[in-house]
Every structure is written in C-alpha cells, then in structure tokens.
Image: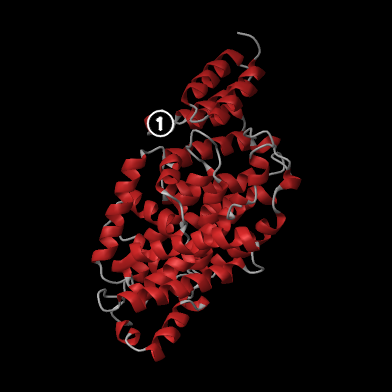
Amino acid sequence: MQLDEHLFRRESARMVAALTRIFGVHNLSLAEDVVQDAFCRALEVWKVRGVPDNPSAWLMATAKNRALDVIRRERTATTFAPELSRMFDSEWTLAPVVDEAFASEVIHDEQLRMMFSCCDPRLKEAVQIALVLNILCGFGAQEIAAAFLAGRAAVEKRIARGKQSLATSQRLFDLTDDDVADRLPVVQRALYLLFNEGYHSASADTVVRTEMCREAIRLTELLAADARTGTPATCALAALMCLHAARLPARITGAGELSALSDQDRSTWDASLIAHGLALLDRSARGADVSVYHLEAAIAAAHVQAPSVEGTDWHTVVELYDRLLALAPSPVVALNRAVAVAQRDGEDSGIAELEAIGDAERLAAYPFYRAAFAELELRRGRTAEAREHFEAAMRLARNAAERRFFQKRLGCCGSA
C-alpha cells in the first residue's frame, strides 16, 4: 500500500506548521521527524486495518499524540516555542495548547508565517524556492534537484542553509509585522516561479510537473484567502495560475506529446478552473494598481474565452503585451508579443518584431525562439528557412517531448 502523494504533501505541510508552532522554529527538524513518524505509523496501521474514512484526521491525531509524547519526555532537556513553554509544565494546560495548535485556523496562519519566513529577502531566490518546496509542499531534495536540473548535493545545501537561517531567527515571521507588505512581493514571486517551473518544466523527463502547479495554486489560494495578504496582485496571481492550469489537460496528449495551442481540444480545458480563475481576476480589479500578474492573467483570460485561435481577440492580446512590456520588459515577453502581432497583422510583421527584439542574445538557448521563426517562415512558404530554424530548436530542446514536438513540425517542411 502506498500513501496518496497529494495527501502526503498537503498534510505534511499542515502538520509541520502545527508542530513548528508547538516546538518552535529552532526545532524544525524535530517537527519534521514527528511528521515522518506519523506517516510511518500510517503505513503500518493502514496496511493491516485499511485506510480510515478520514485519513487527514487520523494523521493529525497521530502527530498530535506524538507531539505530546515528545514534550512530556523532553520538556526538561529541550526548549520549545518560548511563548508556549510555560504552558507545557502542567498536564492541565499541555493538551489544550497542543489541541489549539492543530486547529485549522491556527494551521492556516502558521503556514502563511512559514511561507513568509521561507521567502526572507536575505536568502537567495533559489534557496527560498527550495525551502517552500521542501517545507510547505513536501518535496524531497531529489525531486527538487530533478525539477531544477540541479545536483542533489547542491539542493541539499540550499535547504540546509535555509533551515539554518530559519532556526537562528528564533521565531517565524509575524503577519502583524509592519513589513508584511514589503515581503509580500517576494512571496508572490517565489510562488510564480514555482508554478512556472511546473508549467514550463525544464526537467529532462517531462514538460509539465502538474503536482508542482497544484502546490503553487494551493499556497497562492492560502495567500489570497487571508485579509492581510489577499491583495489585488495576489488574486491576479491566483487567477493567472488557474487560467493556465485549466489548459493543462490539453497541453500534453495521452501519449505524453506536447500539443500546440492551435491543436488543443478546447472542450478538454477545465471549465470549473476557468470560472474560478475569471472570478479571481474580477476580484483582483478592486484596486487601482495594475501588476504584472494582472496583465498576464488578462492575456490568459483572452485565450481561455476564445472559441479558437482564429477567434481570439488578438488586438486586445497585443495591447496587453504592450503594457506588459512597458511594465516588465523581457525578451520572453517580447517574443510572445511578436507571436501575437503575427496573428493580428500577418507573418511578415511577426518576423519583423522577432528580429527587432533588442536583447535577443538572452533567447539564444531558448528553443521556442527559433521555433517562432520557424512557424512564421513555414506560413510564408519559406520551407528551407523554416527547416533550419526547427533543426536549431531541436538541438536546444530541453527534454524528449520538446524534441519530438519540433521533429513533428519539421516534418511539415517537406524534404530538404
């Protein structure tokens, strides 16, 4: 019998949050050990008795009992959370305090505090994301290393360095602190990168890491649901993730092949996720500020609401890319805008926009840059040029699925 992966990730994050509340952030490793104990116990018991009706409640109760055992055994030798330690001296107060730490609203707050603590601006971005994935999403070092094409040893060092920083901070970030607003963009950025890594995976094994997208959405929804952190930009970020994730069922075929937007069966897009994403986008409009997430979500909304590629409102999409380019210029945004211009004004205009990208050298290793040239040259009937670009894209492909996709498109160019 194997534990359901999503159950493990969700409950791991919740239990670590509750136990860190009890033990203190300086005992994070102890909290993680107790969580591991709870899962090991579940494997043993459920194998014999079967999975209980409410596995989450079973795991929480097991972790809670284990926490009580640890405190009773070690309270004279170990210091726990400073604000709670005094309550652990008496059996009259011990159990109620532990019960309270496992209350859903307390766990919700503790997960947010952990999220903000992991995204300490003093930590490098790679360390922040490794911490979020490890502590809040339950990913192991090997999984993180595979996702980011990094060595396991390097990822273990990042996680260890980040946890050491957390432990020395003595307490988790307090959401009543004045700098919540200052740190929120860092948290949003980490979650955005987490989702993008799942959606545009650089993994050698797959082009999509659905579970990573799902975890990014779960954490962003937590952020959006809280009055202190559910800003318009947070809601726009959640909308962006939902609208992109809604298209995932059609992005990869049943055979694991990458599918272009023009070839996707739109009836397989997740209608409920689209509706949720559009509702979040509406909610994000309650403020005056327009963030990068607003513009990207609006572009995603234009795609999911269109009946086809031909029926897409490309004028609006180009205008949104214009605003995005002005707000956050990047060669990838310029590339996407050029593709949209080609749809609106024709292939010649699209090629001109691709050639006009100022810092195109930053796209030199990006296979879809050469693929964009190839597609437009193919539409212009210049098959030799298209072939050359597709062959270059194949050489730059980051995984087998991308390589097969470009190979298939190369087949449309005819014989050399």
Q: Quadrant of residue 318?
A: top right
As drawn, which residue projects farthest toward the right?
Answer: 267
Task: Give whichever of 301, 142 is nearer the camera.
Answer: 142
Using a 10 Å C-alpha cutoff, classify the residue at mark 1 as few (fewer than 14 neighbours), some (14 to 19) or many (20 or more).
some
As drawn, which residue projects farthest toward the bottom?
Answer: 92
Q: Secondary structure at mark 1?
A: helix
Residue 141: percent from left, percent from top: 40, 47
Residue 216: percent from left, percent from top: 50, 56
The residue shown at (52%, 64%) is 11
Residue 372: percent from left, percent from top: 54, 29
Question: Is any part of residue 238 visible from this angle?
Answer: no
**Left of 72 or right of it: where is 411?**
right
Q: Is residue 305 above or below residue 219?
A: above
The residue shown at (37%, 29%) is 361
The residue shown at (62%, 38%) is 344
Residue beneath label 1, please?
360
As drawn, which residue projects farthest toward the top?
Answer: 416
Q: Is residue 105 above or below residue 360?
A: below
Q: Is residue 406 above or below residue 203?
A: above
**Left of 170 or right of it: where is 143?**
right
Question: Is any part of residue 72 visible from this angle?
Answer: yes
The residue shown at (40%, 91%) is 92
Q: Is residue 284 above or below residue 340?
A: below
Query: Of the residues shown, which amino acid type is indicated by label 1?
Result: Ala
Task: Give whichever of 51, 374 is nearer the camera.
Answer: 51
